[in-house]
């Protein structure tokens, strides 16, 4: 294939990836693998061209070295031969000019052109920052120390990889630029450790210590900040900022001592002093999510409140959709995952062929998943939802209509007022923090016409090697993805009131690629299919 034609098709293939936020979807990141492979091939072609050119130049140099050694030993005798005289003139007038053109020949054109075309579709600074934060999210959720992540010691991994000093330093810088000094300390310490172990790197210890000392100072650990700054100055005595910081730290320490002396003189019986923060013993700051600890513990499989008494109330059965004619001969296997609220899992809901077709339809349409701003009602992206999603209509392909019909048969609810089939693919550390599926906002336009989200039907379209559970912090349940299965629960009581126990989350994917699809059934059209109960909480 001609180079310009190859570039054209490459451009055409990647055009829909512009500003794609690759880190939010592993499914789309796979295309980057092939783009990088193409660049490697282009680079190898450039290297072969350069080697061919250098080979010609080397051959010419060796030939001229032999010739000039002979001619300089007896210039007049050499030029006495008229052919030698002619060839000398010709070489200097023509041959050396041809060599000059060979040396100046630019063999980089093809590679640079390919790189330029593809660079506009490369991940951005936002992607790199998002990917770094994803690793930190996995680190926090699954209680992984930087050493474990750096060495790539993760469960279920097929291809092991490790982080260099430069990688760890980059992680620390990302955290620092975000004002996250907790992770700055962790990753700068890891970078320093690997540097001290002798790992080859272009990052200097001075750079690492500069960030680390300041981040430690932000935690109020003045003694350690001074220790690290002194080490920095021992490596670079001309470092102005370090010298200035050290003087500032010394003044603060002196001020602390004076205040301690004053306190002792005022109350001589009080001999206690505030404990010094120990090296590396910095606590993770609290954030906006009140159930953070419970949520993350469930993601790790800890704190699941499945007691023996509750376990006895869970059963497996064949489900025929209340004697639905389509399911009488081939009922679905139904398994209770939780008793109250009742959550069930259905097996063999989607075949591998159907899953691949749904993924094939969804992948080109994937866009960053959004949430509705609780104050304005406007859809926006959020750091607590890291995935990409698309919406499929029945007209897109017969398989979509087939899957929708199957969900209707299983649940006994109508899909006429349900939302389109949503397909989601989770990216690096992909997650959706605790949320409700039902609306609690009176300004939602769909509430009047279609009612609230009555129920959720969630299809798992992939296995996940580690992480990626669906958890319910309120009552301590964790449901793990199994390809081809689906889970179902009601978001509303029969009265129409929201069941606040159904607040749930999609845990970060530690290892693997998580694909799901879901259908939200609405109240309208289901009034007689799921009639009201006698009380508000039936």
Image (cartoon, rainbow, N blue to C red):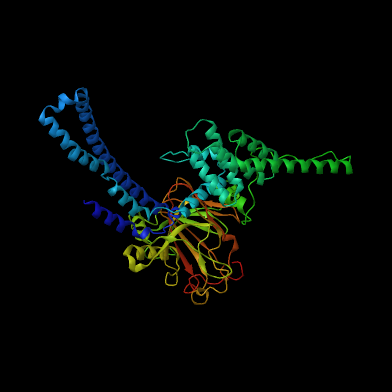
Q: Which residue is nearer to you in this view: 367 or 472?
A: 367
Would you place residue 143 above or below residue 430 in this image?
above
Q: Name the residue located 15 percent from the left edge and 26 percent from the top edge.
A: 78
Residue 301 appears in the figure: no
Residue 143 at x, y = what percent?
Answer: 57, 43
Q: Name the residue located 13 percent from the left edge and 30 percent from the top edge.
A: 84
Would you place residue 15 above or below residue 522 in this image?
above
Residue 448 at x, y = what percent?
Answer: 52, 77
Q: Which quadrant of the rendered structure holds the C terminus?
A: bottom right
Residue 221 at x, y = what percent?
Answer: 69, 42
The image quadrant that residue 139 belongs to is top right
Q: Which residue is nearer to you in this view: 328 or 116?
A: 116
Residue 533 appears in the figure: yes
Q: Residue furthest bottom?
A: 448
Q: Name the residue located 62 percent from the left edge and 50 percent from the top edge.
A: 293
Q: Name the residue located 39 percent from the left edge and 53 percent from the top edge.
A: 122
Count of marks overlaid on the render: 0
Would you place residue 122 above or below residue 374 in this image?
above
Q: Is residue 531 left or right of residue 55?
A: right
The image quadrant that residue 145 belongs to is top right
Q: Is residue 53 left or right of residue 132?
A: left
Residue 276 at x, y = what percent?
Answer: 72, 39
Q: Which residue is nearer to you in this view: 84 or 462?
A: 84
Q: Is residue 240 left or right of residue 160?
A: right
Q: Which residue is nearer to you in this view: 490 or 48?
A: 48
Q: Residue furthest left?
A: 82
């Amino acid at each position: 294939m001609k180079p310009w034609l190859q570039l054209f098709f490459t451009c055409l293939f990647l055009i829909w990836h512009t500003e794609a936020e690759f880190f939010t979807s592993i499914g789309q990141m796979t295309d980057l693998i092939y783009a990088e492979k193409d660049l490697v091939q282009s680079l190898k072609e450039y290297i072969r061209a350069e080697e061919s050119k250098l080979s010609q130049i080397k051959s010419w140099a060796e030939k001229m070295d032999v010739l000039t050694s002979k001619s300089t030993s007896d210039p007049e005798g050499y030029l006495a031969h008229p052919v030698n005289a002619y060839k000398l003139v010709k070489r200097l007038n023509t041959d050396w000019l041809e060599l000059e053109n060979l040396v100046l020949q630019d063999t980089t054109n093809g590679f640079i052109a390919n790189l330029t075309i593809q660079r506009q579709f490369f991940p951005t600074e936002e992607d790199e920052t998002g990917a770094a934060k994803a690793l930190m999210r996995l680190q926090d959720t699954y209680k992984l120390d930087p050493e474990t992540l750096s060495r790539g010691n993760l469960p279920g991994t097929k291809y092991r990889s490790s982080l260099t000093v430069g990688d760890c330093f980059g992680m620390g810088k990302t955290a620092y630029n975000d004002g996250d000094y907790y992770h700055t300390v962790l990753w700068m310490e890891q970078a320093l450790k690997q540097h001290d172990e002798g790992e080859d790197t272009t990052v200097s210890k001075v750079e690492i210590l500069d960030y680390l000392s300041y981040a430690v100072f932000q935690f109020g650990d003045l003694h350690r900040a001074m220790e690290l700054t002194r080490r920095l100055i021992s490596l670079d005595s001309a470092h102005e900022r370090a010298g200035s910081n050290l003087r500032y730290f010394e003044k603060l320490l002196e001020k602390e001592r004076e205040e301690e002396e004053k306190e002792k003189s005022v109350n001589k019986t009080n001999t206690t002093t505030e404990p010094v923060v120990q090296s590396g013993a910095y606590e993770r700051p609290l954030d906006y999510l009140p159930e953070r600890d419970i949520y993350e513990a469930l993601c790790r499989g800890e704190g699941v409140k499945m007691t023996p008494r509750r376990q006895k109330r869970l059963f497996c059965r064949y489900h025929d959709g209340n004697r639905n004619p389509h399911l009488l001969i081939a009922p679905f296997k139904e398994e209770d995952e939780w008793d109250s609220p009742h959550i069930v899992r259905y097996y063999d809901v989607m075949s591998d062929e159907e899953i691949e077709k749904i993924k094939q339809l969804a992948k080109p349409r994937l866009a960053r998943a959004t949430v509705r701003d609780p104050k304005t009602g406007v859809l926006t992206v959020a750091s607590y939802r890291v995935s990409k999603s698309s919406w499929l209509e029945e007209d897109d392909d017969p398989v979509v209509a087939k899957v929708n019909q199957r969900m209707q048969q299983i649940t006994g609810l109508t899909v006429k007022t349900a939302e389109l089939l949503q397909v989601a693919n989770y990216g690096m550390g992909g997650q959706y923090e605790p949320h409700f599926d039902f609306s609690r906002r009176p300004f939602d336009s769909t509430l009047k016409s279609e009612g609230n989200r009555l129920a959720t039907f969630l299809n798992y379209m992939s296995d996940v090697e580690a992480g990626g559970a669906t958890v319910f912090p309120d009552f301590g349940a964790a449901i793990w993805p199994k390809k081809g299965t689906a889970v179902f629960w009601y978001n509303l009581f029969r009265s129409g009131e929201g069941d606040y126990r159904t607040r749930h989350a999609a845990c970060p994917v530690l290892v693997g690629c998580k694909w799901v699809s879901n259908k939200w059934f609405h109240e309208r059209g289901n009034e007689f299919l799921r009639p009201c109960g006698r009380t508000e909480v039936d």
